[in-house]
Image: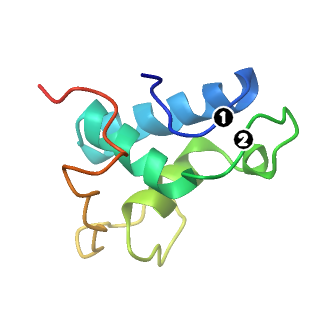
């Protein structure tokens, strides 16, 4: 099974991997959960165009947008202690394509 549940191209695949890496290193989630969150965000969409609109934002924007209910401040110095994460996808959903460890 592919890592992502939607069609991608090299450019969007690279961005998605960067989003996942940001969530792992900066938000402290497992790779499996980060991939599941990315899959939930864009499931059912076709991201196989090298000019896809999602490429107009960087991984930090997408990681925060996908992970948190609301992003009240975009500064890299923003205190995220009170920010509320979205619940992860249900464990039995199709979004989990990477084995949890």
State the image quarter where residue 11 is shown: top right
* Residue that appears at 50% across and 73% down: 73
Residue depicted at x 73% and y 26%: 9
| SS class, disc 1 | loop
**Decide: marks 2, 1 in contact (CB < 8 A)?**
yes
Write the residue at 38% across / 67% down.
68
Quadrant in the rendering for residue 25: top left
Q: Quadrant of the N terminus?
A: top left
**Residue at point 39% right, 38% down?**
35
Q: Is residue 70 left or right of residue 57?
A: left
Find residue 31 and report its horizontal and vertical position in percent.
Answer: 30, 31
Indicate which disc residue 76 carries.
none
Question: Looking at the image, is 79 positioned above or below residue 59?
Answer: below
- Residue 58 drawn above or below residue 77: above
Could you tell me residue 75's position as x and y percent? 53, 63
Q: Is residue 1 above or below residue 53?
A: above
Q: Nearer the viewer, residue 65 or 8?
A: 8
Can the viewer see residue 48?
A: yes
C-alpha separation, residue under disc 2 versus residue under disc 1: 6 Å
Query: Which residue is labeled 2 in the image?
Result: 47
Q: SS of the residue at dot 2?
A: loop
- Farthest residue to the left: give it: 101
**33 left or right, relative to 65:** left
**Residue lying furthest right in this view?**
51
Residue 83 in picture, x, y percent from top left: 30, 73
Check residue 7 in the rendering and tell me which mark sits there, or answer none: 1
């Amino acid at each position: 099974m592919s890592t992502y549940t939607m069609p991608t191209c090299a450019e969007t695949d690279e961005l998605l991997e960067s989003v996942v890496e940001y969530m792992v290193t900066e938000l402290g989630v497992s790779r499996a959960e980060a991939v599941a969150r990315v899959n939930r965000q864009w499931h059912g969409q076709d991201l196989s165009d090298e000019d896809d609109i999602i490429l107009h934002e960087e991984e930090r924007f997408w990681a925060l947008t996908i992970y948190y209910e609301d992003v009240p401040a975009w500064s890299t110095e923003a205190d995220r202690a009170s920010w509320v994460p979205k619940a992860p996808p249900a464990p039995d959903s199709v979004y989990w394509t990477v084995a949890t460890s």
